[in-house]
Image (tube, grey):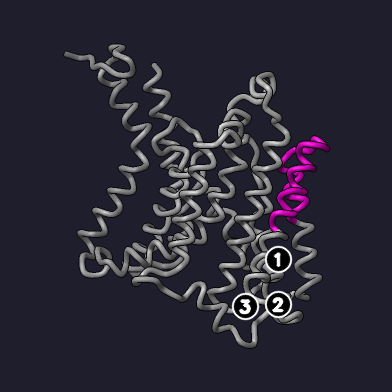
């Protein structure tokens, strides 16, 4: 036999079946291969419980900001201001503690509120003014950089008594750092919002076919604004959590998360679905990059390999999925 049965009993060539499997599971195979290879090469350091917790802890902040970005990508837009938003939120949270002696919960709320406001501004510029998201989010992100420098003067904002602030990142519950719980909780909430609510389904409809979504009564512009607000708020939360790792905030601390978030989200679009952005895929993308970075560190390789690996993961993960889907459709 040279055929197999897939999708509602329709017989397809066996080669199409193989390409379909590669398209949907190729990214997961890549992650599994990486884990298997490192478990063989470094069994005493990589394949340990402590290292698994370490990888998840290193994934936490990237996952939070990437999940926020996923909301804008799902609605058919994107946000280039997330790095600047994260930096500004961290500076705002530390500044209100240092200069106004507010409580830590209020400082975190202030930082997240700033991020939500930036997201709202992005959404209004894109949907009301009709400015392309590339220009709009780049412009708003640059404004955020300016505000950041105006607040901090270009120097890090450091807490004089950071112990309670540091506890948010350094504290543990049954041996697992708090940021891992935050990542897991937000992932669950984000998945439920996107897949089990009217708002989430509206977001996916707007991103899939905005014209059809509009004709079916979905307010596409409003839905996209909500996506930008969620994205800004989670980017800001990432910036605040980043500040809790050191007890201080730098004006450019969140910049490196921009590329990492996009790489994770696009790699995740090749996981389980045919090029669609979704929360599970994004988390898998973040973990794949974190496993790779961990492997590079354990093997004693130079830091520049991390950038090479991140770029190759994105190209291979998405590229193979694209080719496989094209072949499967033939």
What is the spatial separation of the Cα atoms under label 2 and label 3, in whole angstroms?
15 Å
Residue 27 versus residue 162: which sits nearer the camera? 162
Q: Which mark is residue 248?
A: 3
Could you tell me which secondary element the residue under label 1 belongs to? helix
What is the spatial separation of the Cα atoms under label 1 and label 2, in whole angstroms?
10 Å
315 displayed left or right of 133: left
Could you tell me which secondary element the residue under label 3 belongs to? strand
What is the spatial separation of the Cα atoms under label 3 and label 1, in whole angstroms?
16 Å
118 part of magenta stretch? yes
User: In terms of sequence position, does the residue under pointer 2 or pointer 3 come before the other?
Assistant: 2
User: In terms of sequence position, does the residue under pointer 1 or pointer 2 come before the other?
Assistant: 2
Q: Quadrant of residue 155?
A: bottom right
- Residue highlighted by disc 2: 102
Magenta residues, as a range?
Answer: 115-141
User: In terms of sequence position, does the residue under pointer 3 or pointer 1 come before the other?
Assistant: 1
237 vs 212: above or below: below
- Determine whether label 1 and label 2 are within 8 Å by CB: yes
Q: Residue 118, image x and y in percent?
A: 74, 54
Q: Residue at x 46, y 43 (%)?
A: 267
201 displayed left or right of 223: left
101 part of magenta stretch? no
* Residues packed near mark 2 inside 10 Å, few (<14), some (14 to 19) or many (20 plus): some
- Residue highlighted by disc 1: 110
Position of the N terminus by quadrant? top left
Q: Which mark is residue 243?
A: none
Q: Residue 105, image x and y in percent?
A: 63, 70
Q: Residue at x 23, y 59 (%)?
A: 39
Q: Residue 247, image x and y in percent?
A: 59, 79
144 displayed left or right of 320: right
80 vs 42: above or below: above
Could you tell me which secondary element the residue under label 2 belongs to? loop
> Is most of the magenta stretch helix, strand or loop?
helix
């Amino acid at each position: 036999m040279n055929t197999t049965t897939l999708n509602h009993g329709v017989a397809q060539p066996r080669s199409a079946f193989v390409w379909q499997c590669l398209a949907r599971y190729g990214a997961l195979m890549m992650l599994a291969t990486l884990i298997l290879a490192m478990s063989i090469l470094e069994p005493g350091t990589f394949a340990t419980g402590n290292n698994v917790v370490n990888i998840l802890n290193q994934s936490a902040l990237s996952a939070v900001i990437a999940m926020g970005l996923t909301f804008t990508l799902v609605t058919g837009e994107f946000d280039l201001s997330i790095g600047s938003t994260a930096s500004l939120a961290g500076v705002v949270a530390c500044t209100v503690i240092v200069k106004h002696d507010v409580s830590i919960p209020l400082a975190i709320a202030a930082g997240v509120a700033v991020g939500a406001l930036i997201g709202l501004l992005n959404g209004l510029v894109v949907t009301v003014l009709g400015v392309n998201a590339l220009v709009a989010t780049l412009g708003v992100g640059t404004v955020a950089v300016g505000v950041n420098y105006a607040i901090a003067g270009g120097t890090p904002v450091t807490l004089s008594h950071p112990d309670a602030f540091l506890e948010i990142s350094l504290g543990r519950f049954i041996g697992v750092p708090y940021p891992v719980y935050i990542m897991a909780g937000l992932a669950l909430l984000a998945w439920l919002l996107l897949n089990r609510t009217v708002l989430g389904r509206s977001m996916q409809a707007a991103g899939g076919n905005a014209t059809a979504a509009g004709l079916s009564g979905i307010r596409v512009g409003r839905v996209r604004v909500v996506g930008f607000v969620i994205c800004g708020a989670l980017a800001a939360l990432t910036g605040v959590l980043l500040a809790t790792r050191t007890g201080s905030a730098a004006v450019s601390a969140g910049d490196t998360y921009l590329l990492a978030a996009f790489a994770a989200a696009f790699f995740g679009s090749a996981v389980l679905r045919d090029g669609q952005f979704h929360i599970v895929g994004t988390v898998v993308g973040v973990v794949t990059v974190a496993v790779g970075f961990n492997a590079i560190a354990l093997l004693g390789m130079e830091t520049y390999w991390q950038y090479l690996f991140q770029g190759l993961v994105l190209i291979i993960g998405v590229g193979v999925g694209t080719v496989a889907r094209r072949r499967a459709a033939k």
